[in-house]
Image (cartoon, rainbow, N blue to C red):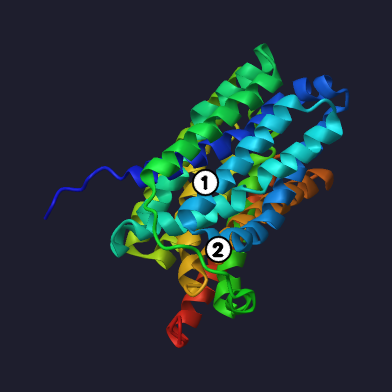
């Protein structure tokens, strides 16, 4: 068997994922300095995060269909050009409303880049390694949480938030060059048959796969959104310990992404079921483990691995279920992940608002993960009864 050669296409896609991860998550750590810079309250500055998530959800299908005629290589480069433009606009924004618009512009590339990128990643490797290839692209997103986001946050706090956005724009330029050099030119794009592709997306097996993504992401973000106050309240953690745990979660994300891709190469349904079950068990056990700093550090690392190990199999499950329209389905699945982000944050917030205590937050996420596990079983039974594509 010939030795595997280094895949420059996957590296270029991971570079783009790294940049997108930095621009998505770094504003959360810079909210106070951004709020002061554009003279608004921190809650108002928080709407910049919400606006980005909304832009991802809406932009994913729209931008995928709009750029389908370009061909995937040109489309991915054009999407990173939008990313670069949005970050430049953010760096130069004179006021809050201009910055809000800039964040929406930046978000428009997100879903379509990951959606089309997943299709390209799967196309440059043998079929038995497709899930690992998709995971390789998402590795850039997980590594961003370990190094890129903390660095951008430090720059924002010590040099200025505008400098952080400008630096992220440089990542966009580097990614465009990498995509131009590494991606195969491929066939020219074609005008999409919107009615046919949307028809594929409303099939029950596709909807079940998308809803599984929503449940998995909801479980993850029910806790991730409130991880700092949970650790502070339940564990009695200091600010420094919270920062350490955030780094450990990033390490867990990276390990889980790799592991999820490997297991998904064996079985998509098996991988989704294993990691959703693990995530549910970990989160349901969290109130009994988070009481000590050592337990919290270990648990949150393992939790991060289980949470992100779900991503490669659920992404591939949607692409497989909607194999006639993989690009659009893959992009919409990224939107579904962001919808889960919003739902999970709302569920965790509801538990807090109901005076159930911060220890109840991971329990809510555990129950949501269990619901996702049920959907995996339902989807598997449907495919056994009606083979995909029949």
Residue 190: x and y in percent read 52, 68
Residue farthest top in this picture: 158
On screen, 225 above or below 122?
Answer: above
Q: Residue at x 60, y 32 (%)?
A: 291
Is residue 301 among what the camera can see? Answer: no
Image location of residue 7, percent across then percent down? 30, 45
380 versus 132 height, above or below: below
- The numbered mark at residue 77 is 1
Q: Residues within 10 Å of mark 2 (few under 14, many from 20)?
A: some
Q: Quadrant of residue 29?
A: top right
Mark 2–mark 1 contact, CB under 8 Å? no
Q: Quadrant of residue 224?
A: top right
As drawn, is 185 to the left or to the right of 319? Answer: left
Q: Residue at x 48, y 37 (%)?
A: 175
Query: Which labelled disc corresponds to residue 69?
Result: 2
Q: Give the position of the N terminus as an image quadrant.
A: bottom left
The tag earlier along the polypeptide, 2 or 1, is: 2
């Amino acid at each position: 068997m010939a030795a595997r050669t280094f895949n420059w296409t996957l590296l270029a896609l991971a570079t783009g994922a790294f940049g997108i991860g930095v621009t998505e998550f770094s504003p959360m750590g810079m909210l106070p300095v951004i709020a002061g810079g554009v003279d608004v309250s921190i809650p108002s500055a928080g709407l910049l995060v919400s606006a980005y998530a909304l832009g991802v959800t809406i932009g994913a299908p729209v931008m995928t269909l709009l750029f389908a005629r370009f061909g995937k290589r040109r489309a991915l480069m054009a999407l990173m050009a939008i990313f670069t433009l949005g970050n430049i606009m953010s760096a130069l924004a004179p006021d809050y409303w201009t910055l809000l618009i800039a964040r929406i512009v930046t978000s428009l590339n997100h879903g379509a880049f990951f959606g089309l990128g997943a299709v390209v990643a799967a196309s440059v490797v043998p079929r038995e390694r497709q899930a690992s290839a998709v995971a390789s692209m998402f590795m850039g997103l997980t590594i961003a949480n370990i190094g890129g986001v903390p660095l951008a946050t430090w720059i924002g706090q010590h040099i200025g938030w505008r400098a952080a956005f400008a630096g992220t724009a440089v990542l966009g330029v580097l990614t465009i060059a990498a995509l131009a050099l590494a991606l195969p030119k491929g066939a020219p794009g074609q005008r999409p048959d919107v009615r046919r592709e949307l028809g594929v997306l409303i099939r029950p097996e596709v909807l079940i796969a998308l809803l599984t993504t929503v449940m998995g992401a909801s479980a993850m973000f029910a806790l991730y959104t409130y991880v700092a106050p949970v650790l502070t309240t339940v564990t009695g953690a200091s600010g420094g310990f919270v920062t350490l745990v955030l780094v450990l979660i990033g390490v867990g994300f990276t390990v889980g992404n790799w592991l999820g891709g490997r297991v998904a190469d064996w079985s998509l349904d098996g991988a989704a079921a294993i990691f959703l079950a693990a995530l549910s068990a970990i989160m349901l056990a969290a109130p009994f483990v988070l009481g000590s700093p050592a337990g919290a550090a270990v648990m949150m690392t393992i939790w991060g691995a289980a949470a992100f190990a779900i991503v490669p199999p659920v992404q591939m499950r949607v692409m497989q279920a909607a194999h006639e329209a993989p690009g659009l389905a893959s992009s919409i699945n990224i939107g579904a992940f962001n919808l889960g982000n919003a739902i999970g944050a709302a569920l965790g917030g509801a538990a807090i608002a109901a005076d159930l205590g911060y220890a109840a937050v991971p329990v809510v996420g555990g129950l949501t993960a269990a619901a996702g596990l049920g959907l995996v079983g339902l989807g598997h039974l449907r495919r056994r009864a009606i083979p995909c594509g029949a």
